[in-house]
Image: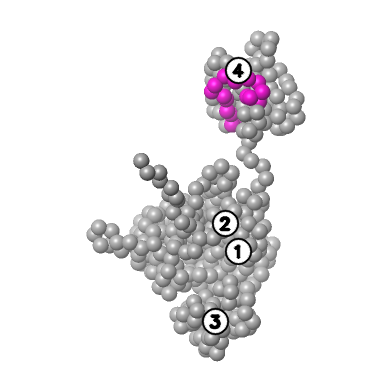
Amino acid sequence: MKTITNLRPKGTYDLFNQKGELFLKTRDLFFKLASNFNFNFIDTPIFEYLTVFYTSGKQSDLVSKELYKFSDRSERTMALRAEGTAPVMRAIAENKLFLDNKKFFYFGQMFRYEKPQKGRSRQFWQAGCEFIDLSDDSQTAAYQKLEILQLGITLLNQLNIDYKIKLNYLATEQTRQKYIEALKQYFQQYKDKLEKISQQRLEKNPLRILDDKIESQKDFVINAPKIDTFYSEAEKQDFETILVVLKDNKIDFEVDTNLVRGLDYYDDLVFEFVSDSPALGQRTTILGGGCYYNLVSDFQMPAAKGVGFAIGVDRLLEILSLNTQNERTIDFYFLGFNFDEIKTFAFLANQIRQDNFTAEFNKKPTSFTKGFKKAQKTNAKLIVFYEKDQPANTVTIKTLSTGKKQIVEFSSSAITKLLKENNV
């Protein structure tokens, strides 16, 4: 029979061991924090009708280059889920969830056909949240935007991930169109100095030139017209209100007038949390989002504005893998030298697991030396075993970190009490 090799598709990865543990930790923490902030969980199909993603902008890189598209047997054009916001809006509209709930969070896999690199895969995990009832009152809306940012901040702080927050204000569509026309005129004189892809963007979406990693380093891009010079008085006041609320709540941020985000549905405030971790390289976005005025109405919901963010979970895992030195540990390893002892320890280990302690036991009789080495490999905090001439109804417990041995009563309560008392 022919051997099958190279089964894993390009741009995908297998999740296991340390990174698998970090994934579970990150997922569980996000679910907990989102619930603490009173967001409701929502999940959507892994594929949607292609038109759902047109809300991201037909000229956006996501729609024009990165979607995995296919036709089903009924000749309906579908696309694998490439980002979370548009499918969530479709689900909210179709199920009329906007009548009761306004705050949602999601966690799932996305697919984009792009060049694989560190922290950027063709199949990847994304977490996000959406608030679909953004107030028309500037002050109220500022606090709604604050809450969204606070959720992202809390998550990254609890994961011990360093970041910088960058903000920009894209104003309304009318103001943005004036700005886009000014950019087209300005960049026309530098067209031959733009990368090929940016020359294409010049006519379709010149905003994308501003935050392109290559173009953004060029002097003429740095000196391009700034959107804040196009703000109306009302827009200036609105942005200032947001900044004051953030400052009042001790949020550190930097205003970056070249920040535009990659999807076309953004209005008003946009933001990115940027990491300089060596795991990913400088200026890598790990969380990004902003406000959207028209996306809600695109799905035939009552007129409303929204705000939300998405997190690149894969990128968090790269940073956490670099930062995390210690491997997974377990609380107890039960070491049996014969099947009678293994039978006893199998029962005791299961009792302890019911009390939310982690435990392992060997299934095959072994010597002390071999068994102890195996226990060490599991990073057990305590090793439980019988010694020769052990007093009846007792076991010996060895603390792996200190080498200290103690004899305790044979019971799950006595054994777990030792772990708690010694704060191992």
Residue at 70% across, 24% down: 398
Q: Residue at x 38, y 54 (%)?
A: 45
Marks 1 and 2 close (CB-CB < 8 Å): yes
Q: Which mark is residue 315?
A: 2
Label located before the other in sequence (3 or 1): 3
Query: What amino acid does circle 3 point to?
Result: Leu
Between circles 2 and 3, the one closer to the viewer is 3
**Residue denoted by label 4:** 337
368 in magenta: yes
Quadrant assignment for the C terminus = top right
Examine the rendering and report whether any part of residue 342 can be seen: yes
Q: Residue 59 versus residue 295: which sits nearer the camera?
A: 59
Q: CA distance from mark 1 to mark 4?
A: 52 Å
Is there a contact, CB below 8 Å, between mark 3 and mark 1?
A: no
Q: Quadrant of the N terminus?
A: top left
Magenta segment: 357-372
Kindly identify which residue carries mark 3. 194
Residue holding disc 1: 284
Q: Nearer the viewer, mark 3 or mark 1?
A: 3
Of residues 391 and 372, the one drawn nearer to the viewer in this rendering = 372
**Residues under labels 2 and 3: Cα distance?**
29 Å
**Residue 208 screen position, x and y as percent:** 52, 75
Q: Quadrant of residue 301?
A: bottom left
Side of 339 relative to 90 (left or right):
right
Q: Earlier in the sequence, mark 1 or mark 2?
A: 1
Dot 2 lies on which element?
helix
Q: Secondary structure at mark 3?
A: loop
